[in-house]
Image (cartoon, rainbow, N blue to C red):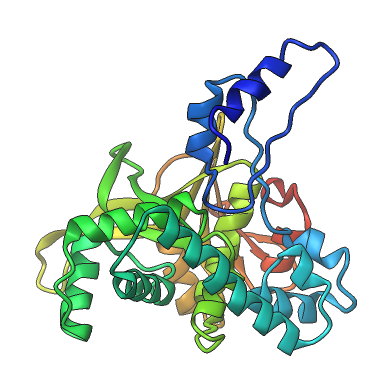
């Protein structure tokens, strides 16, 4: 909090046997501030919560109970050492309200705090769903009769992204090779904070598993988008229509690309066909994967589509190469 402190740190770079590490635990010193203050003289290291593999390294139980715990209480290191659910709930609830929320309000001098809290509630309930500021504004108007502006919504979302609470996944037209500006999806950097915000009431495993897959891909260094494939089809009346198929994730790292579907359960051939439909319409040779919770072994069908369970995906860092 001292003026010109970064100049002192930069001066230390001239000493050959000195490395300088600057850490921040809240939004008072954000990633974009680091870039500005140190002008490219160092590297940024993002510190994430524990991956599921790391979490299982300290978890006293089997992988199934571990995942049930992880999907609710997440991978914050201190939480993983707590023994009771009461401890975890109290800590996470207080962490969100007393640290994250207060930091954002104080940093940006927000006066209408209820609007910010309402926006957070909307985003927590919409994990994995396509949305945008106009859609959120319509929700505000219909649900709580709020006249919040689109610019305010955009500004508050930016604050939440800067504080590493949420992260956005843009839509990418696979065949057109271009990004679609809106709508997009928001995921929580730490799912346990999302659950805490909702009082641990809306623990929909389908959306939370999707959020965990998104985070895991980013932990592994991939940039992650939501894929869109448009295809000409014939409707029941024989008319030609353009139908849009969504791919949950398009993960890119250098020359590598993977198309990934998150399917909590695929109990029937009809459900399997539904999950594979968007992947079959892509038309390129990059690997296509379905991640689910209800199969045991990794399988590969005649079209080359790989299906694996969530445990194999999370516990094996090379799982995408299977």
Q: Is residue 16 above or below residue 84?
A: above
Nearest the eye: 67 or 283: 67
Q: Is residue 279 something one can see in this rendering?
A: no
On the image, the x and y values in percent for residue 204 come to 52, 82
At x 27% / y 46%, what residue is drawn?
A: 180
At x 58% / y 51%, what residue is drawn?
A: 304
Q: Is residue 267 something one can see in this rendering?
A: yes
Tell me if 119 is positioned left or right of 200 in this view.
left
On the image, the x and y values in percent for residue 265 come to 56, 78
Nearest the eye: 180 or 136: 136
On the image, the x and y values in percent for residue 173 come to 31, 45
On the image, the x and y values in percent for residue 213 come to 59, 60
Tell me if 133 is positioned left or right of 251 in this view.
left
Res 117 quadrant in image:
bottom left
At x 28% / y 38%, what residue is drawn?
A: 176
Q: Is residue 66 above or below residue 232?
A: below
Nearest the eye: 205 or 266: 205
Tell me if 237 is positioned left or right of 151 in this view.
left
At x 55% / y 44%, what residue is drawn?
A: 29
Nearest the eye: 256 or 20: 20
Quarter of the image with the N terminus is: top right
Res 192 quadrant in image:
bottom right
């Amino acid at each position: 909090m001292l003026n010109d402190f970064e100049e002192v740190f930069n001066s230390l770079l001239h000493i050959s046997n000195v490395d300088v590490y600057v850490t921040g635990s809240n939004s008072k010193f954000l990633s974009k501030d680091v870039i500005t203050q140190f002008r490219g003289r160092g590297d940024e290291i993002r510190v994430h919560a524990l991956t599921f593999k790391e979490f299982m390294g300290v978890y006293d139980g089997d992988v199934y109970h571990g995942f049930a715990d992880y999907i609710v209480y997440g991978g914050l290191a201190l939480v993983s050492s707590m023994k009771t659910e009461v401890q975890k709930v109290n800590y996470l609830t207080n962490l969100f309200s007393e640290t994250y929320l207060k930091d954002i309000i104080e940093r940006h001098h927000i006066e209408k705090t209820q609007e910010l809290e309402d926006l957070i509630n909307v985003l927590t309930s919409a994990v994995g769903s396509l949305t945008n500021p106009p859609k959120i504004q319509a929700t505000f108007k219909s649900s709580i009769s709020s006249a919040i502006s689109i610019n305010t919504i955009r500004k508050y979302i930016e604050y939440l992204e800067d504080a590493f609470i949420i992260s956005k996944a843009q839509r990418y037209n696979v065949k057109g090779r271009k990004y679609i500006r809106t709508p997009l999806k928001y995921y929580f950097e730490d799912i346990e904070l999302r659950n805490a915000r909702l009082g641990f009431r809306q623990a929909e495993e389908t959306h939370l598993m999707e959020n965990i897959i998104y985070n895991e891909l980013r932990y592994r260094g991939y940039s992650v988008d939501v894929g869109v494939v448009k295809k000409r089809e014939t409707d029941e009346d024989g008319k030609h229509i353009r139908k849009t198929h969504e791919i949950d994730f398009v993960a890119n790292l250098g020359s590598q690309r993977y198309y990934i579907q998150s399917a909590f359960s695929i109990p029937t051939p009809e459900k399997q066909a539904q999950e594979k439909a968007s992947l079959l319409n892509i038309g390129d040779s990059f690997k296509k994967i379905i991640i689910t919770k209800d199969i045991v072994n990794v399988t590969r069908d005649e079209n080359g589509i790989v299906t694996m369970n969530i445990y194999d995906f999370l516990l094996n860092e090379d799982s995408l190469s299977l």
